Amino acid sequence: MKLEDIVTVKIGRNLSRGNEKNDLTLVAYSYEDLMNDLDGSILGPQASSVSENSNHKDGYLSSAGDVVFSFVSSKAGIVSDLNQGKIINQNFAKLIFESNQLDRHYLCYALNESNSMKRQMAISMQGSTVPKLTPAILKELEIKLPSIGKQRTIGKAYFFLRKRQALAKKQAELEEQLFLEVLKQLDH
């Protein structure tokens, strides 16, 4: 089944035009935000409230629970409460669910880790000087859908693994800081 059969790909706003006055007050959703959301937002809460479809006046604003995809890094994540209300720029797309046959966590797993999806993306981007997935390529990707129960299990396990890896990395960084500080104290 093609991705476009079950999700609508809504491309973010072109911020370089900046034709509205309130654009200055909005904060853009960034790659760092995406990675924090994907790794369980160590600094803040995970998306607790899940919006089925954004009901914002401005469809370019992120809502907790939105699935976003980066065309630059070819990574998908789920917007956390911490990043709600940020503007989605043209380097990202919101993936709006048209069916309840698909779990948002599983979709992120499939786009980020599935060998089948990675292979399709690599083939589609062959010959490009700057390999970047386009909205048209994203829509055409074939996705295999196991039962919704299996999707939920895979999706939860994937996000648990991501969070665990991020926590292990943070722990290693803190240990390094501690040891270096102790060494500095010993050196005096």
Image (spheres, helix red, strand yellow):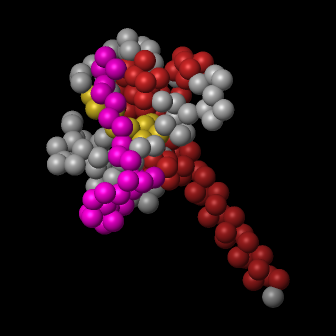
The structure residue drawn at horizontal position 33% and vertical position 52%, both measured from the top left corner, is 87
* Percent position of residue 13, x then y: 35, 46
In magenta, the rendered stretch is: 4-30
Q: How many marks?
A: 0
Q: Is residue 163 magenta?
A: no
Q: Does the magenta-highlighted stretch encompass residue 14? A: yes
Is residue 83 visible from the viewing direction of this image?
no
Residue 118 vertical position relative to residue 161 in the rendered view, above or below: above
Closer to the camera in the image, 70 or 163:
70
Q: Quadrant of the N terminus?
A: top left
Q: Residue at x 28, y 32 (%)?
A: 96
x then y, percent, for residue 173? 64, 60
Q: Residue at x 47, y 40 (%)?
A: 70
* Residue 53 seen in the figure: yes
Q: Which residue occupies the extreme bottom position in the image?
A: 188
The x, y position of residue 92, in whole percent, is 42, 41
Question: Is 58 positioned to the left or the right of 158 in the image?
Answer: left
Q: From the image, which quarter does the C terminus lie in?
A: bottom right
Q: Relative to 153, is 184 above or below?
A: below
Q: Residue furthest right?
A: 187
**Residue situated in front as seen by the camera: 10 or 39:** 10
- Say which residue appears at 44% left-offset and 60% top-offset: 43
Quarter of the view holding residue 21: bottom left
Q: Is residue 6 left or right of residue 112?
A: left
Quick one: which residue is furthest to the top in this view? 1
Q: Is residue 44 left or right of residue 52?
A: right
